[in-house]
Image: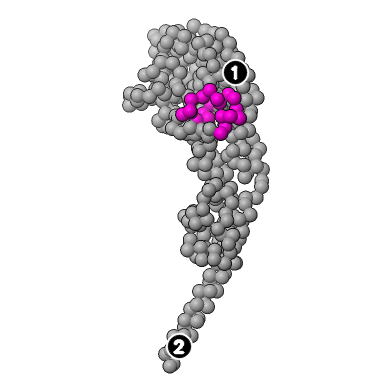
Amino acid sequence: MKRILFASAALVLLLAGFGWWFASEAWFGRPTAPEPIPFTVDAGRSGREVVADLAAVGIIPSAWRYRLYGYLDRSVSRPKAGAYQLRPGQSYREIARTLAIGPARREVEVRIVEGWTVDQIASHLESAYGVSAATTTALIGRAANRSPFDETLRADYPFLRGLPRNRSLEGYLFPDTYRVWGDQLPDGLVRKQLDEFGARFATTTVGTQSAPLKTLDEVVILASIVEAEVREPRDRRLVAGIFLNRLQIGMPLQTDASISYLTGSGRARSTAADLAIDSPFNTYKYPGLPPAPINNPGEDVIRAVLDPAPSDYFYFLSDAAGNTYYARTLEEHAANRRRAGF
């Protein structure tokens, strides 16, 4: 009998201890971390999946204990999509209520740099604002036409309607600094970028000075190349004219920037292996424009292509300091390479 009483008492103490420990974790939490962790609930994500995500990033110590708490608090099963800032150590009750109410509405400032690619934009939104890259790329697509943009945008922006179905929004996400509600990322930002592009260029007419270019899309493609190739604004109109000179005579553009974009290497100079890649983005192998822009160029670069500086140059190169050298012939270009230290 004494053994039974002792065992019963021990069990009661054990259950009481577990209950106190669980209650303190569920309702009071632990000492919180000094820095919050960005956490995103994607639309359509189930409550069970969100719990697993919380545990995976270390916001909660145990998925099964949080689910156990969910039997007492049904808000656990009703997380709202959005971007959050959560601290490890918060109580289960606080986390569940925060996710059930939805993200606090706050305005954020987002700077998109001239020349960034769609992949760089997605990465920036994830690292700086906690918006998953997968959510952003589902909307804007991926670099080098690896995935297309969301078709619902095409109806709202006439300048997108003529783009091939496999295209991303590369080239059309106007770089600038924007103020956006945090719970409207990435859609609110992307629409502001497209609005800005449309306000500046939707009604643009491509004149004879930009021949052989005929469409706005071709202008944007070439502008993205100029954006990547030259650092100094003073060189842009002249370099745009050089590329147009090449296109006029069917000469390959031979831009390393398009190959670097394709491979994601970031190399300023292509390797022999790079030059052998069979892709329309390889502008050494295929004459004409690549099939899509290679970044999102700034307004000044697009206007440089619309109003290029005429010249009889066919070659140029830039050194490490940003100085640009121009040449009419291959022999002059070779001499410039020596002068630039190549």
Q: Nearer the viewer, residue 335 or 44?
A: 44
Which image quarter is the C terminus in? top left
Which SS class for mark 1? helix
Disc number at residue 156?
A: none
Region in magenta: 152-171
Q: Which residue is mark 2?
A: 6
Residue at the spot 53% in from the left edge and 48% down from the top edge: 44
Which SS class for mark 2? helix
Q: Position of residue 215 (x, y in %)?
A: 54, 16
**Residue 83 located left or right of residue 292:** right
Residue at the spot 53% in from the left edge and 26% down from the top edge: 171
Q: Is residue 132 magenta?
A: no
Q: Which residue is mark 1?
A: 303
Q: Main secondary structure of the magenta part?
A: loop
Instruction: Check the image and report above or below for 149 versus 54.
Output: above
Label 2: how many Cα within 10 Å (few below 14, some 14–19, many 20+): few
Q: Is residue 170 magenta?
A: yes
Q: Is residue 337 visible?
A: no
Alpha carbons under labels 1 and 2: distance apart: 87 Å
Q: Position of residue 252 (x, y in %)?
A: 41, 15
Q: Position of residue 211 (x, y in %)?
A: 52, 10
Q: Amino acid at mark 1?
A: Arg
Which image quarter is the N terminus in? bottom left
Instruction: Check the image and report above or below for 286 versus 296.
Output: above
Q: Position of residue 40 (x, y in %)?
A: 54, 48
Q: Nearer the viewer, residue 83 or 86?
A: 83
Instruction: Check the image and report above or below for 304 versus 70.
Output: above
Residue at the spot 41% in from the left edge and 25% down from the top edge: 259
Label 1: how many Cα within 10 Å (few below 14, some 14–19, many 20+): some
